[in-house]
Each structure stands twice: as structure tokens, then as C-alpha cells.
Image (cartoon, grey):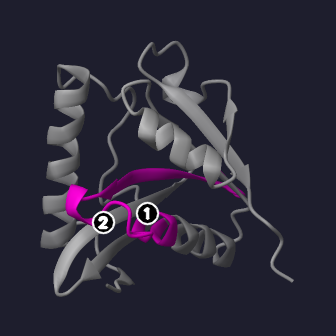
Amino acid sequence: MTWTITERPWNDPDGTALRAAQRAELDTRYGSDDHEPGTPPSAADIDVFLVAVRDGRAIGCGALRRLDATTAEVKRMYVDPAGRGSGVAAGLLRALEQAALTRGWTTLRLETGPGQPDAMRFYEREGYHRIPLFGAYIGSEVSVCYERTLPNPQ
């Protein structure tokens, strides 16, 4: 099975549905809806939003929010359970990294949490390393932060 990844507006219906599914899954994992320190992403502050589609069905998404001139934050990385194990998460992450590089952003950061050990393993496998909590996540008991310096495109 193959999938395609395209850039879409933040309010794209497929993307909105994927983000709602992610939120419901995280609410279940954390036992509440209070698991996101800081400002939730919005159309006003998301610079890139990607959606992965397989057989006409949206199965994953991911976004970038610029933090400064060279750094962006990965937001709303999510793959529907039916699409997990297909490589789409890695494909989305690589596409986000490429989008960051084209904008001159050489460092990506992200926040996940202890209720998402699968996400923590995924990011570590993909070359991200744990860093101290940053920004709105400082002091959070439900946050684990990661960072990756992107390879210099030759």
C-alpha cells in the first residue's frame, strides 16, 4: 500500500478530523483533556500542515510552527491506528524536515509525553534526542521534549 503526502490548509476537513482523533486518543491515554501545556496550534501560527492519504483516505498529519529564525516545532504528528506500521509517520516527519529546510529552519523541536512511549521510541529512532523542557513546557509534568539538528542539504 502506498500513500501520498500533500500540504493543506490548517482548516482542511481531513486534517481537522485527524486532529480530533488524535485529541480523543490522547484524552484516553492521559485520562483527561488537560495534557497540552501552552498555546494549542492554530491557523494563525502554523506555517506548514501536511496530510498523508492512502487509497483516498486521510491517515496521518503533521505540522510545523516557527519558533525563531532557525527553529520550528513539530505539532500534531498523528497517524490513524489503521495506518500505523506502514512507514507513513516517518514519511510525514521527513516531509516536515524538508519543509523546514526549505524555509531555513535547521532545528526541529517537539513535545510529547510519558503517556506516549510509542511516540518517544519513534522520535528517538528517527534521530531526535531528549532535551530539557522548553518554552511553555517548562515545569510540565506531562511533557517530554526532543530536538534534532537537520542535516545540511548539500
Is residue 81 part of the magenta span, yes or no?
yes
In the image, 148 versus 43, the foreground residue is: 148
In the picture, residue 28 is in which quadrant? top left
Is residue 39 part of the magenta span, yes or no?
no
Write the residue at 34% across / 48% down: 41
Q: Is residue 126 above or below residue 86?
A: above
Q: Is residue 107 above or below residue 100?
A: above
In the image, 99 versus 23, the foreground residue is: 23
Q: Is residue 59 left or right of residue 138?
A: left
Range covered by the magenta-colored residues: 68-92
The disc label shown at residue 60, or none: 2
Q: Secondary structure at mark 2?
A: strand
**Where residue 145 sits in the image (x, y, percent)?**
57, 33
Q: Is residue 51 above or below residue 111?
A: below
Q: Is residue 108 above or below residue 23?
A: below
Spatial CA distance of label 1 from label 2 is: 7 Å
In the picture, residue 25 is in which quadrant? top left
**Where residue 16 sits in the image (x, y, percent)?**
17, 61
> Mark 2 belongs to which amino acid?
Gly
The disc label shown at residue 89, or none: 1
Write the residue at 21% across / 74% down: 58
- The quarter of the rendered structure image containing the N terminus is bottom left
The answer to whether marks 1 and 2 mark residues whose Cβ atoms lie closer than 8 Å is yes
Q: Is residue 54 left or right of residue 64?
A: left
Q: Secondary structure at mark 1?
A: helix
In the image, 43 versus 18, the foreground residue is: 18
